[in-house]
Image (tube, coloured by chain):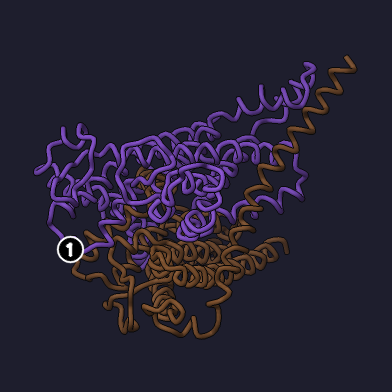
Chain colours: A brown, B purple
Amino acid sequence: MQATRRWERRAERLFVGLCLAAILLPLATLVWLVADVVIDALPRLGPDFLTSFPSRRASSAGVFPALVGSVYLIGLTALFAVPLGVGAAVYLEEYGGRGRFSRLVELNIANLAGVPSIIYGLLGLAVFVRTLGLGRSLLAGALTLALLILPVIITATREALRTVPGLLREGSYALGATRWQTIRHVVLPMAAPGIMTGSILAISRAIGETAPLIVIGALTYMAFLPEGPLEPFTALPIQIFNWVSRPQAGFTTAAAAGIVVLLTTLLILNGLAVFLRNRLQRRIHV
Amino acid sequence: MDIHASEELPHVAAAPDDDAAPTPAPRPARSAPLRERVIEWALAGSGALTLLTTAGILGVLAVETWRFFDEVPLTDFLGDTQWTPLFADKHFGIWPLLGATLLTSAIAIAVALPFGLLAAIYMSEFAPARVRRVLKPMLEVLAGIPTVVYGYFALIVVTPMLQTVVPDLASFNALSPGIVMGIMIIPMISSLSEDALYAVPQSLREGAYALGAGRLPTIFRVVVPAARSGITAALTLAIGRAIGETMIVAIAAGQQPNLTLDPRVPIETMTAYIVQVSMGDTPAGTLEYRTIFAVAAALFVMTLALNAISIRLIGRRREA
């Protein structure tokens, strides 16, 4: 009896060790990945990498048009996806109730979240690029990415709306406010930090997306900047993919440097999201 | 007007039996300002846009796939074992692409499932709340790294390292991207599985202890089986993610449609083929152009089935 107990305890300790390893090993891989990319990128990292155009010579190739393209994409995508996503979420939470339409939309969103991003690229190619005649433009890219992250924004916004206590709505109605006045002046301001956090996280997902932009035809080599929403464009992940695909070692360095720029952008956006989330928590606990 | 009013009735009738829902707002009556109604319709329109997205995907894939099968018989698509639509001697057998997709996904799941499940068990059953609060978001960072970065990592770092261990490993292969994709998917499995394990009532564990069961038997014979549907849902979602994953395999697995189960040689997945054609100058309306829609349609059907399974499983858990 004593012996089996001791055995059991030893097995348990062994198992806990195994479980811990299952967490720490992937995390170590993550550290390894980032460290490796940064070390690979060192020879090319510098201010001129950010301000140079891509080049046939790897040592002078830069990410300028890709960075500018990504910034435009972030802005345009947010412009479409945030109002539409918040609107849909407000409808589902504040108006929809348990009606058939709401349930259909909910089921549909759950399903859309599982559709591979490359399929959205084909949708964008057929609808925005060809049927609507937008061509392989920034606008077509932003619309495609907006559809891709719409489910994420809707889900995050709904969660933020749910944290607003019902008491506040009732108070507003008691003062004679209409439903929309209540939403506009009571519910949305309370939920704003949560909505912004969710939207930023969704947009940071969009920046890293490569496959849908390749399908709609983002350029892989650009010696100029897009001057309007209907111009051709490139983006950071596309530029990285292009450099990774080249056999010369110099382009590997450029790809690593591009990855550092991409990850830094993501880090800044996520830091912003965490900052906003902390502000939200403080407000609710007061 | 009448349509609007008749839509109101089921909502009002349904509200009282739903205790969890927030207090139903006073519904604007017919006399409500026009502004209120216009806003409601606009918001509903945003919701309808998501339905339109699904309809658009279905429509686009159906139309182009239909045209594809006008020229290529379905028996070729499902019967031929070669995929060479870009060559002079054209073959349209989906199996090399499908096999490659299943191979890389299987490798990814073989990595992600044990790691993800063990991580979930640790966080739910062993970790102190403080450790859990730190580890969980750290693990989730893995899912937030862009896939093009993982592709770089697989091709430039993991493959050369594996080549020192695995003899005859080509520079493009299924093994390395499969493993890297598995690491990326770990948080998907651990997150949902942990929720499921955590939701198992404490009374079940106490009952097992009362019967004299140790901690490990309780976990493996009581807690994990009780969380089975949640864990299966996590697994199906992860499989869907692996099948649809594009950049890792497009960068590190190659562009050669080989019908093989050998993880050491170059292959081409369904997604990598779509990327390959998109990178070229295939004009719209040609048969080559339509192949990517046919391949995407096959991909969509697979992920749709997996989504349906996981949505049903998650729904069942909520009801239980």
- Residue A42 drawn at (x, y percent): 58, 74
- Position above or below: B275 against A275: above
- Residue B230 drawn at (x, y percent): 54, 34
Please report the residue visible at 25 percent of the width from the left and 70 percent of the height from the top.
A136
For this orientation, the residue located farthest to the right is A2
What's the chain of the residue with tag 1? A
State left or right for residue A130 relative to residue A260: left
| Quadrant of the snapshot with the N terminus of chain A | top right
- Residue B174 drawn at (x, y percent): 43, 44
Please report the residue visible at 88 percent of the width from the left and 18 percent of the height from the top.
A3
Q: Nearer the viewer, residue A31 or A134?
A: A31
- Position above or below: B217 against A249: above
- From this viewpoint, is residue A166 visible? no
So how many labels did they put on this image?
1
- At label 1, which amino acid type do we have? Thr
- Residue A189 drawn at (x, y percent): 55, 69
Give the residue pinned by disc 1.
Answer: A131
